[in-house]
Amino acid sequence: MNRPNPFGFPPVERIGEGPARIDESAVRFFPHAPGPQDRVVLLLHGLGSNEQDLLSLAPMLPGGVVYASLRGVLACGPGFGWLAPPPLGADDLGLLEESAVALEDWTGRVAPGRVIGAIGFSQGAVLALQLLRRRADALDWAVALSGAPFPADLPGDAALAERDVPVLWGHGGQDPLFDPAMETQVRDWLQRHARLIEELSPTLGHGIDEQILDAVAAFVRARLAEGASS
């Protein structure tokens, strides 16, 4: 976990002993803690950040659901993460799977209500897509911001492609983590495995701007409307 990386991210370190677990004391909700009847949307931050990051966006997103912002299960400098820094290799799948299992355990054991979607940034986007790749019916939809599917063929990919899950891929045209070849690869994968809606902000780097946030809000609003009519 201490390997060099070209983007200058700190290495990730395990927290405590035993299997990775969601820190329940660090989970933050907006606008309130969910009850059994609430629909829940997961907010999954990027490398080196924490549960407060995407929570700051929740007031600008559609209401009628509870947003649950979770802290990564690995330490990364002063923040947290879900897997190793980029670029990812096949040997990093184990950490991603640990994070996915920890999240599945939390949603199944602790989260009241029904988890309907996930909004992930960077590593959080990788994790959101991984939940669907592990079980195609895990979420009704996902938002992947400045992120990509883990670069490997996985057993659940065929089932995911059959289900046609709506996925918003929002990203910047100046993102240093996405060269043109990588961008094409991600787009092709999402087109083959999901109902892709893409939002490209041409001058944006590795981040979220007003254009992307507006696209996320519109996407979530449309998914909630679909759910209300079904």
Image: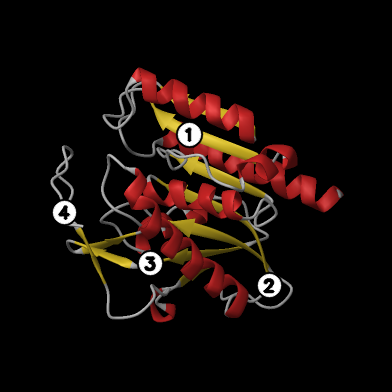
- Within the image, what quadrant is residue 16 found in? bottom left
Between the C-alphas of marks 4 and 2, the distance is: 36 Å
* Secondary structure found at label 3: loop
Between the C-alphas of marks 3 and 1, the distance is: 22 Å
- Within the image, what quadrant is residue 115 found in? bottom right
Between the C-alphas of marks 2 and 3, the distance is: 20 Å
* Secondary structure found at label 1: strand
* Type of colouring: secondary structure
- Residue at numbered disc 2: 113
Q: Earlier in the sequence, mark 3 or mark 1?
A: 3
Would you place residue 34 above or below residue 208 in this image? below
Label pair 3/1, CB-CB below 8 angstroms? no
Q: Is residue 158 left or right of residue 230?
A: left
Q: Earlier in the sequence, mark 2 or mark 3?
A: 3
Q: Earlier in the sequence, mark 4 or mark 3?
A: 4
Given residues 153 and 206, the one toward you in this image is 153
- Residue at numbered disc 4: 10
Regarding residue 87, the answer to whether it shows in the image is: yes
Which three-letter amino acid code belongs to the residue tagged 3? Answer: Arg
